[in-house]
Every structure is written in structure tokens, then in C-alpha cells.
Amino acid sequence: GIGLDTSRELVKRDLKNLVILDRIDNPAVIAELKAINPKVTVTFYPYDVTVPLAETTKLLKTIFAQLKTVDVLINGAGILDDHQIERTIAVNFTGLVNTTTAILDFWDKRKGGPGGVICNIGSVTGFNAIYQVPVYSASKAAVVSFTQSIAKLANVTGVTAFTVNPGITKTTLVHKFNSWLDVETRVAERLLEHPIQTTLACAQNFVKAIELNKNGAI
Amino acid sequence: GIGLDTSRELVKRDLKNLVILDRIDNPAVIAELKAINPKVTVTFYPYDVTVPLAETTKLLKTIFAQLKTVDVLINGAGILDDHQIERTIAVNFTGLVNTTTAILDFWDKRKGGPGGVICNIGSVTGFNAIYQVPVYSASKAAVVSFTQSIAKLANVTGVTAFTVNPGITKTTLVHKFNSWLDVETRVAERLLEHPIQTTLACAQNFVKAIELNKNGAI
């Protein structure tokens, strides 16, 4: 989806390292990313954003020890299924907050850290809900609000933040998904009747946003 | 706090029943509410909004069996402590979504239910974050977004919804609270330098909002 195409775009750039954190290892994808630009070191670590904060901190300790510096964190984990209330909130919102909180331990300038950049994936539904998926939409509204606050704290922490907020994108997420209490059984079909973008177009704009790197941008 | 003063205002009205759901039983408070207006039957049930959906459904089954009808649900549980990330999200956002989802089982017109009214307590921070408490503020942004979606689904479910969004109110919540990663250690003191309202003033406006009962209002 968006994550993979964004990674493809990122490794075309002059990066030293790209660390992919995902629940499921996909060696073929990692090999493909490595082949696009052999100058970029691509590594993978298994990570489920719903683990407790302490586990995230432990994983980040390993990563920071290996890379010495990490410049950008992209929080991209997300699910779209309003039958799964707790999991939607845990992945889309709590996981993103915990991962952000954990990395501050390494970046916070009050602790002598070098600062850093956080890119959080919101959604246009954070501004204009798809009301048939109220839980998903609200979780994205939370991401936007949280990120705006983090951006305002940049003078304290040295960490800047912005959101990328894709419109309807042709990902596996939107092929078919459950509305809240089945208020609309054809919500995916109806959504796909709208103009939609490809994951590639989304990824290209995504990387553009990262390159612009404007604190507090939405 | 706001909940108690709102209950005091509510029992002055021509209600049949007021059911108080809270984590901790406070018999003195229930007795006081009963004394204000003996015509209103005030009952208390212990309830922690962070329990799984099925437990909420079970409790609501008991309540609906006892009262026959319930007209209004007020989701008022809330905490303000950005050191407790998971709990803030669980109480302020997930708990409110689960309670709302559970009561739909009894109210949903698609199941022959009579409809109902949901009043969710948001906060001005849902619109303009107090960025020193980004988790709290984001949880309230989520409440506002979620409620707006539920309001738009009223034609499907028969259930209307609105939020009440208090400004800074002199509750125990704001006496002293932790900012995210201690970005501002004097956040409570600084907040209380602003014009603030009493819980009574807040409760009176709160009940006014309930009486107006405008679907989708904020």
C-alpha cells in the first residue's frame, strides 16, 4: 500500500538508512527495496505498534545503537474496520502516540538529544469524517490534533512534526471494510465511486511533504 | 465536578429516572440527589467505561429491564493526565465509543428500538488543543469527530447525538495535572490564570444543551 510505495520513493533518495518496522516480515519487499538503490541500507524489524511503551523503547534502543542517528520517524500503521473498535484506536491512535513518546527519549533536546522529525499519517477523514466509519475517522482526527500539539512543542523538545493526510487512496484498506454497526454495508463500494488516487501518487506527494518538512504542516 | 453539578440540575427537572454510572459509589451524593427532588428515582450502578463492550451490554440489559425506557445517555467519564497515555485514551475515547455502541443495541431503530439521545462531553481542547496535554486534547478531538458522525447516522439508527464542550472549568481535574513528558511542569497553574467557569455554571449550560437537544450540535 502507501507504506511500500513510499519506501520505494524514499530509497531513490540520498538516504543512508531506511528502517522498516512492521508486524509481518516480507523478505521479498526488503530485497526489492535494497535492489532499487544499493547505497541505502534497508533493515527490517518486527514491530506491532500496540505493544506497551517499554517494549517500543527497547526496540528503539537496538535501532539507535545500530544506526547511531535516526533523523525521521514515519508513523504509518493503520487499520480501517469499524467492527474492531479497540484495535482501530490501539493501532491508529494509541500506537502512534506511544511510538512518538518512546522516540522522544532519544531525541528530546532537554536530555541532550539531537531532535528529530516525526511524520504522522493522518487522513482527510481527520477533518471531514466518513461518518459510516466514525471510529476510524475519530482516530484520525486524534492523530491530527496530537501532531499539531507535538509541533507546537518543538521549541521545548527539538522535535518537529507534521501530518500527511491522504484522500481516498486505492489501497487494500479500502477494498472492503466494515462500517460501524453495519450502518452502510456498501461503504467501500460507495467510497470507490469517488475520484481516488493511486498509492504511487500518494507516496510521491508523501515524500514531497517529508522533503518540505514543515513543522506543524497538515 | 461537572457530573455532580449536572446531576443536581437534572433532578430539579421533571425526570422520572436518573441513573448514575460511576466507578466509585458515593451514597452521600446519591442521597443528596434524591433529597433535591423526591419525584425523581435516582439509582446508582458501578461502571468502569474501560470494561469490554460485552460487559457494558450486560449492565445496560439490567438497566433497561428495570426502567423499561431510557431516553438520554450522557457520556461524561474523563481523565486529564498525560502521563497516563493508554488510560486517557481508554477512558476519554474508547470508553465513550464502547458505551455508545452498546446502547445502540437497545435503541437502534433497525432492530425495532425507539431511538434515543446521546450527549457526549467533549472539550474546547477538541477544537483548540492545550498542546502541553496533546493526548488529552487529541482524545477530545476524537470525541467531537465521533459524535458528529453519530449525529449524521441518525436517519439510519434513530439515535441523535451532540457534544457539550466546556472551556476551562474549576474541577478537580485541573487542580494539578501532568503534561506530556513534563513539557510544562506548571501547566495547571498557567491554565488557571485564564478566565475559568465554575462547575455550576458549566452544569447549567450543560442541561440547557440537553434541553435544546439539537442533533449534531457542538
Image (cartoon, coloured by chain):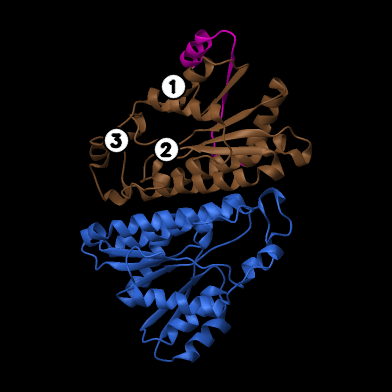
Chain colours: A brown, B blue
Vertical placement of residue B130 versus B21, above or below: above
Residue at numbered disc 1: A5
| Nearest to the observer: residue B121 or residue B48 | B121
Query: Are the residues flagged by discs 1 and 2 from a single subunit?
Result: yes
Q: Would residue A35 be counted in the magenta stretch?
A: yes
Q: Chain of mark 2?
A: A
Count of numbered labels shown in the rendering: 3
Residue at numbered disc 3: A176
Callout 3 crowding tier (Cα within 10 Å): few <14, some 14–19, many ≥20: some
Q: Give the magenta part as a residue range.
A: A27-52
Lower sequence index among marks 2 and 3: 2
Q: Amino acid at mark 3?
A: Lys
Instruction: Tell me if label 2 and label 3 are in contact, CB under 8 Å.
Output: no
Which labelled disc corresponds to residue A146?
A: none
Which labelled disc corresponds to residue A79?
A: 2
The percent coordinates of residue A164 (x first, y second) are 48, 35
Q: CA distance from mark 3 to mark 1?
A: 21 Å
Q: Does residue B202 appear anywhere in the picture?
A: yes
The percent coordinates of residue A150 (x first, y second) are 61, 45
The quadrant where residue B185 appears: bottom right
